[in-house]
Amino acid sequence: MKALDISGLQKTYKGGVQALKGLDLQVNEGDFFALLGPNGAGKSTTIGIISSLVNASAGQVSVFDYDLETQKESAKACIGLVPQEFNFNQFETVLQIVLNQAGYYGVTRTTAKERAKKYLTQLDLWEKRDARARELSGGMKRRLMIARALMHEPRLLILDEPTAGVDIEIRRSMWTFLKDINEQGITIILTTHYLEEAESLCRNIAIIDKGVIVENTSMRSLLSKL
Ligand code: ADP
Ligand code: ADP
């Protein structure tokens, strides 16, 4: 099954910027997929549309065969998003943030608490569960965003520059975590500026430039060309 199937996706922002110009992209279930491209290429716009934060101007998107327009709620339930910007309430505690997210997706309280403990422990945040978000380091905040995105156990996890500004040691531990959950069956798509990150994690890669896909290949064959 396709985790993601995008065809002819277009986005023109108010003001006339054509961010996407007929983008086609398929990602198989179980894949660990990298979306690379220079600044302004359209990566965040693509992710925004997949996660229903940005409206497309034209084209089709389906997530695990759920059409994003006609079966939006089912599609959204499949997706966990780790945005680039920290967007949680800085005055809430780590535990509140993940539990609120679970509540938002209709996860029962008992299950939410179990998952909170599991994911916060795996991401080395359980000790910090009563700390307010504003007290966390940058690396901890990034990990909190991952834990939060997993609370409804999405089948597809999308991460926009997940390790931006994170030091190499923490970055490596985040990679190990992402590899583990991918092996457990979650499809992962990430954007990154670090080629090293894509190289060590991703099986397949698409390069986006000026609103279209210019390369779509396995990591192995891309590396053999460099
Ligand atoms: P990337 O994530 O690859 O850096 P973006 O998707 O953020 O690329 O941006 C693609 C293009 O769309 C850029 O030219 C950017 O300036 C423009 N853009 C992004 N968001 C908006 C917006 N909200 N309004 C107008 N233009 C935007
Ligand atoms: P308390 O015992 O103070 O309610 P909890 O740890 O049980 O503390 O909950 C922390 C916060 O998360 C509370 O504000 C609670 O209302 C909120 N919350 C929202 N949705 C959920 C949910 N699905 N499961 C658990 N807690 C939730």
Image (spheres, rainbow, N blue to C red):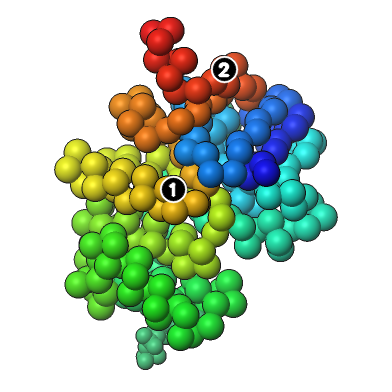
Secondary structure of residue under mark 1: helix
Give the amino acid type for the residue marked by disc 2 in the picture: Glu
The quadrant in which residue 21 appears is top right
Q: Position of residue 124 (x, y in %)?
A: 23, 62
> 45 or 222: which is nearer to us?
222
Q: Quadrant of the N terminus?
A: top right
- 99 versus 23 height, above or below: below
Q: Position of residue 142 (x, y in %)?
A: 33, 53
Label 1: which residue?
A: 182
The quadrant in which residue 13 appears is top right
**Numbered badge on residue 68:** none
Few, some or many residues within 10 Å of mark 2 (<14, 14–19, 20+) = few
Q: Position of residue 63 (x, y in %)?
A: 68, 48
Few, some or many residues within 10 Å of mark 1 (<14, 14–19, 20+) = some
Q: Foreground mark, 1 or 2?
A: 1
The quadrant in which residue 133 appears is bottom left
Left-right relation of 64 to 84: right
> 62 or 31: which is nearer to us?
31
Residue 12 is at least partly visible in this image: no
Left-right relation of 131 to 156: left
- 51 versus 102 height, above or below: above
Residue shown at the point (24%, 42%) measured from the top left:
172
Q: Quadrant of the C terminus?
A: top left
Residue shown at the point (61%, 57%) measured from the top left:
78
Circle 1/circle 2 CB separation < 8 Å? no
**Numbered badge on residue 215:** 2
Cα separation, mark 1 vs mark 2, equals: 23 Å
Secondary structure of residue under mark 2: strand
Q: Name the residue furthest left.
A: 169
Give the amino acid type for the residue marked by disc 1 in the picture: Asn
Residue shown at the point (59%, 16%) measured from the top left:
214
